[in-house]
Amino acid sequence: MHERASLPGPRPLPIVGSLLEFREHGLLPIYLGHWRRYGDVIGYRFGPQRAVAIVHPDHLREVFIRRRASYGKGLSVRNIRPLIGDGLFAADGDLWQRQRRILQPLFTVSAVRAYGAAMGEAIDAFIARWLALPPGEAVDLLPEMSHLAMDVICRTMFGMAAGAEAGELSAAVSEAFHWVGERGVKLLPLPLRVPTPGNRAFLRAKARIDRFIRRVIAERRRRGPRADGGDLLDRLLQATDEESGERMLEEQVVNEVITVFIAGHETTAVTLTWAWLLLAGHREVEARLHAELDAVLSGQPPTIEAVPKLVYTRQVIDEALRLYPPVWLDPREAFADEEIAGYPIPKGTLIMPMLYATHRHPEFWPDPERFDPERFSPERAQGRHPLAHVPFGGGPRVCLGMAFALQEMVLAVAALGQRFRVRRAYGTLMDLDPKAGTLRPRWPSLVEVERRE
Ligand code: HEM
């Protein structure tokens, strides 16, 4: 293809480039303004670092699928690496391939059915929590959904409820994550070995996480797998590489447990929060959801067998993920000189696929801001570009936990929607937090929970 000259984009300031503007207002709102002005491919500079934002599904296909050998995680994961080491999310090359081969069988649609019972226990405990709420009391949805998602991952992974021992782990993960987030917007982050208060707090939290996980692994090895068929930890400890027959080294198990623990709850908590807020603002959608729940479940709690029948429930979740994809940016580094849309992409460029904007691309999504789960009906979804809806990424690196997350979210929306109605308390705004790592609401999302009798 004929190469075009330079990339469209804002004129960067000397030395810092666009970093100050992004730091001040958050990357996403500034980018959306640029997208309207400059179009689908935009060049940036962050200090000496070149970056390119992309949004069109055809360009995502180049990076995630067709030319994927030229792109890896590389520098895009440098801030999270001190926390998860070479865990799957941050791994590249042969290591990523081997780890994906080992972990994939634990997360297929049929494998995650085994976690249905533990998910159900967490959801039942959560229903009891909401039944105990004094009538009319407002609750903040995000912490509520985080509590539920944390309990799901603790029960499925360690066979223990959150808040018991696992509470220690979640507090340490939040602390460590805070450091990862802050580092992303620092002009000159000091190396971890420099004992700044922030670095010391991170290292303390990381040591607590490692101690917890090593202890749980050691206990499990001593006692042997659980009698009831096992949890995710049992399966991780027994997982073998089908090519070499080898098991993971202890170090890698620790990294994968931290990775799955982190990846496995924040994203689902954020999605469920947006889903309830959207339902609260769209009574006609809520009414259709209730009609499906009443027809399919006939008053019984949802089971794994019911999940494929809850078609509209799934559409509601898909549409919430379209409007508010928790991972709104899914970055890569160009490992080789490349080209996107005819523009040269030099090796070392940071690639920024803006999934939030892809989900609003006017070529694929008419009236994009409207909440309309019908977009995902089989008729309307037919023939749509396969990368127009990519909340879980795309290609071989697609989210490992996709089936797990969808099963969990369908079960949770069904079980809670069967019992409760969420009403936005006066003044609750649907506004994004421009600086959060995942796509969180900006303000406390206060709601009232009504019982459906
Ligand atoms: C709504 C829920 C979730 C969303 C939106 C989400 C989204 C994503 C995205 C966008 C990626 C990056 C894909 C890429 O690099 O192109 C990813 C990777 C990953 N996710 Fe999720 N995720 C969710 C839930 C989960 C859950 C529940 C788990 C585990 C139980 C999980 C485990 C992982 C892992 C291990 C990776 C790394 C995969 C790899 O690099 O091969 N995720 N996820």
Image (cartoon, helix red, strand yellow):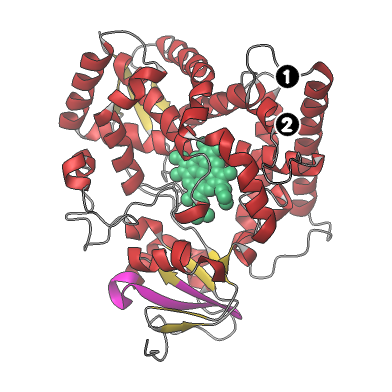
Image quarter of residue 336: bottom right
> Total label count?
2
Residue 341 vs 267, above or below: the answer is below
Give, as a three-letter code, the residue at label 1: Pro
Q: Which residue was labeled with disc 2?
A: 237
- What percent of the width, then of the height, locates residue 66? 44, 67
Q: Amino acid at mark 2?
A: Leu
In terms of depth relative to the viewer, which is nearer, 204 or 344? 344
Quadrant, the C terminus: top left
Magenta span covers which residues? 35-52
Does the segment drawn in magenta span residue 45?
yes
Q: Residue 240 vs residue 122: left or right? A: right
Q: Nearer the viewer, residue 367 or 426?
A: 367
Residue 6 in magenta?
A: no
Q: Nearer the viewer, residue 191 or 222?
A: 222
Up the image or down, 177 lies above or below 19; here it is above
